[in-house]
Amino acid sequence: MSLLAPSILAADFNRLGENIKILEKSGIKLLHIDVMDGMFVPSISFGMPLITSIRKETALFFDVHLMIEKPERYIKNFCESGANSLLIHYEACKDLKNNLLRIRDYGMEAGIVINPESSVADIEEYLEFADRVLVMTVHPGFGGQLMIEKELSKVRELKRLRQEHGYDYIIEIDGGVTKDNINVAVECGTDVIVAGTAVFSGDIEKNVFVLKEKCEK
Ligand code: DX5
Ligand code: ZN
């Protein structure tokens, strides 16, 4: 059983509010929000003002994925915009532990993200400070890429470590999820499955119905 988290990066920004209402009606509980700075990743998406604006209209959980350098500069700002969790890249900050603790201090859930080139061993010492761990199943920066399925082995590893040490972080994957490969992610025990293109291209309600059904198996 997994939870589906639509990534609004793939939404129609001209109709963002309407798109979010459709998601709420379809039983979605968590929105994945991709912030890109054009430095940590090549592209630029959106930032605090957009989050502040959609926060006014919805009580959904905002899972905010920061693909930015030195994310510690903006912890307070994202908290004030209405983020419920902040997911920061292992590759993007010098003092990961301190940043995770600061995120928690602001009352948000603290998440670690790893790119395909980083291993679970790289972040093992920080797992006790994490409420969420996000495994990238594509190289971050763009929606609509193909999933690198071998990255799912990190989900199994994270589950094993969670059990071994009695941690309680939520395990997420992000990138390249489709109706055809979502089963594999559900079967390996992913708690939260992020999907952009698969949710927003075509009929959102129908897509959510199909993907959610597969998540709930
Ligand atoms: C990729 C982002 C993803 C992206 C997923 O850099 O972190 O959250 O929006 O999009 P899809 O599901 O289209 O791969
Ligand atoms: Zn993301």
Image (cartoon, grey):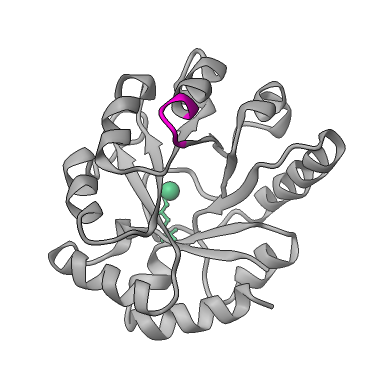
Verify whether residue 193 appears in magenta: no
Q: Position of residue 73 (x, y in %)?
A: 31, 19
Is the residue 187 above or below the residue 216 in the image?
above
- Indicate left or right for 46 with 192 as reference: left
In this rendering, the count of numbered labels is 0
Is the residue 118 above or below the residue 190 in the image?
above
Hey, which residue is sitting farthest left in the picture? Answer: 14
Q: Position of residue 107 (x, y in %)?
A: 44, 33
Q: In the image, what residue occupies the spot 28% across and 68% down?
A: 20
Q: In the image, what residue occupies the spot 44% across and 57% down?
A: 145
Q: In the image, what residue occupies the spot 16% across and 69% down?
A: 15
- Indicate left or right for 136 with 143 as reference: right
The residue lying toward the viewer, choosing from 167 and 203, is 167
Q: In the image, what residue occupies the spot 52% across and 70% down?
A: 178
Hey, which residue is sitting farthest right in the picture? Answer: 164
Is the residue 177 above or below the residue 84 in the image?
below
Q: Quadrant of residue 14?
A: bottom left
Q: Position of residue 24 (x, y in %)?
A: 36, 72
The residue lying toward the viewer, choosing from 145 and 152, is 152
The residue lying toward the viewer, choosing from 141 and 199, is 199
- Indicate left or right for 182 with 78 as reference: right
- Quadrant assignment for the N terminus: bottom right
- Quadrant assignment for the C terminus: bottom right
Q: Give the dominant element type of the magenta stretch: helix, strand or loop.
A: loop
The stretch in magenta equals 104-108
Q: Position of residue 211 (x, y in %)?
A: 53, 77
- Indicate left or right for 201 with 50 as reference: right
Verify whether residue 105 appears in magenta: yes
The residue lying toward the viewer, choosing from 77 and 67, is 77
Q: Quadrant of residue 212?
A: bottom right
